[in-house]
Amino acid sequence: MAEEKTSVEAIEVMNASSDESVASMQDAVESPQDESFRCSDHAERSLQRMEFCLQNLQLTDIVLCVGDHRIPAHRLVLSACSEYFEAMFSNGLKESFQTEVVLQDIDPDCLQELVHYCYTGCLDLKEDTVELMLATSSLLQITQVTDACSKFLEKRLDPSNCIGITLFADTQSCLSLLEKAHNFTTEHFMEVVGNQEFLQLDAETFAKLIASDDLNVPNEEDVVNALITWLKFSPDARKEHVSKLLENVKLPLLPPSFVVDRIESNPLFNEDPKCKELIMEAMKFHLLPERKNTFSSARTRPRKSTVGTLCAVGGIDSSKGANSIERFDLRLNKWSHVANMSGQRLQFGVALLDGKIVVVGGRDGLKTMSIVESFDFARKTWSSLPNMATPRHGLGVGVLGGPLYAVGGHDGWSYLNSVERWDPQTRDWNYVAPMSFQRSTVGVAVLGDRCVR
């Protein structure tokens, strides 16, 4: 029995020792002695040390020669920032084994600044040298600098320099800058034509500009006036391009009187046979309206800025009653907020009268209204017009020969067959002949000289 007891005690001691070993191992796993260290400013400190070596000409292994300028550097640093230098030093080219490399057609001051940028990541951009810096960084494929120069120029676009920047971006294949500069030129065309850059445009670039349907002009007459201004700047040298340029003007969309007075009688155009054909095409377009479809071409397609504006007025939103007016710009392909009505309104009538939006009747959710409001796009202001004699919602409206007609609807109690007319001259509402039937949510359109419901 004593021996058995001793054995049991020994086993218990062994089990306890084993448990302590397991616990010790678990503690070791849960509390590792190894650590991971990361120096947050390692890259910056390393580059600073490399820059110190450059300043003291230590460990430099390449000299860039531009004319009389000699610029020492480290191949690895240059290759890390420039795909151009990376390809030069790592693809077995002869420059890989040279201690001096001669570079052609590069401004030495720009190169010096870009070498300094490779070590510091810093560069001063200046208006008088930014284009040269962009061209140099583009050649050396230092993408970050090229992008920074492009954004610098984008911020400084104005009507006096946008054409020059467009042409420059095209030669440098800076697509983002090219798009921004071109869009700025088309957007501000009416201001651009008053600047020297516009007058000095070559014929090909000018033709592409006025051919754009995105040109922001109030009407096509302004394009003709810009063309005449450009031709008169150097008539003898530019007369050979006149017909090619006139092809990009939408002559059929011009008023016939303008075609006769400003184009057909103008010596700049009437001596060129091709111009005469284009003028005749425009006149036929007006003389034979039933054949307009046969004249379909780029010249009969209006520019986006001249087709008018689509407006969405009021309606129902998440709050069950919107009071805003939004406008869709076909040229920019986007909606924008224009104004708010005096309050939320549903089931009203809308018409365009003398270039103004007129909102007629409707209901505010509970009460049917007779109020009439007019919005002036030019002044961005609302004005009140005389109320209708009868409150109406679900009415139809139309403008016929000057007066505004309010047709049918519901007065809050019953459906209506009555029709009112508002005369802009007398500023009075008067009843006219009623409809044969009561109608609400009625559609009204003007066809010829009649209102059709």
Image (tube, rainbow, N blue to C red):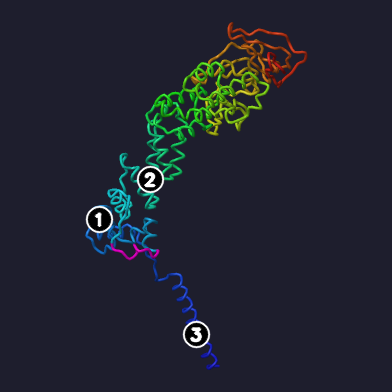
Between 95 and 40, which is closer to the camera in this rendering?
Answer: 95
Task: Quickly name the residue at label 1.
Answer: 70
Marked residue nearer the N-terminal end (3 or 2)? 3
Q: In the image, which disc is placed on residue 14?
A: 3
Mark 3 to mark 2: distance in Å? 73 Å
Marked residue nearer the N-terminal end (1 or 2)? 1
Q: Which picture quadrant has residue 24?
A: bottom left
The image shows residue 344, relative to residue 48, as above or below, that is above
Mark 1 to mark 2: distance in Å? 26 Å
Q: Residues within 10 Å of mark 3 (few under 14, many from 20)?
A: few
Task: Quickly name the residue at label 2.
Answer: 148
Image quadrant holding the N terminus, namely bottom right
Q: Which picture quadrant has residue 236?
A: top left
Image quadrant holding the C terminus, namely top right
In the image, what residue type sits under mark 1? Arg
Find residue 180 and report its horizontal and vertical position in percent: 45, 38
